[in-house]
Amino acid sequence: MPVGGRMVGKFGHGSASSQGRSHPGINEEIIWVSIGMGVTIAILITIALCYIMREKCKKRHEYYITA
């Protein structure tokens, strides 16, 4: 009994090789969606960091005005 391996069918054919070639458009779509999600996450992180830095600079500026 294989541990952590891929289970093969009665005839010894792996299912991953036949499914990978039958739908190439799905794989390409998954890649583009992944790239899009990565770019979206990077933009959101950048916006959050800019907001944090703006708040820190604003507080520092207010400190110099009141002091």
Image: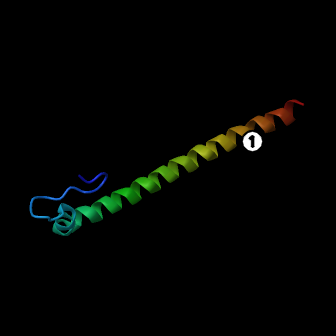
**Residue displayed at 80% across by 34% down:** 62
Image quadrant holding the C terminus, namely: top right
* In this picture, residue 37 sits left or right of residue 7: right
Farthest residue to the right: give it: 67
**Residue displayed at 51% across by 47% down:** 44
**Residue displayed at 9% across by 59% down:** 10
In the image, residue 66 lies at what x, y percent?
Answer: 86, 30
Residue position marked by numbered label 1 in the rendering: 57
Query: Quarter-wise, where is residue 9 in the image?
Result: bottom left
Is 8 above or below relative to 60? below
Farthest residue to the left: give it: 11
Is 15 above or below relative to 64? below
* In this picture, residue 25 sits left or right of residue 66: left
Work out whether residue 41 or residue 56 is closer to the camera in this orientation and state it: 41
Is 25 above or below relative to 33? below
Is 18 above or below relative to 48? below
Query: Quarter-wise, where is residue 30 in the image?
Result: bottom left
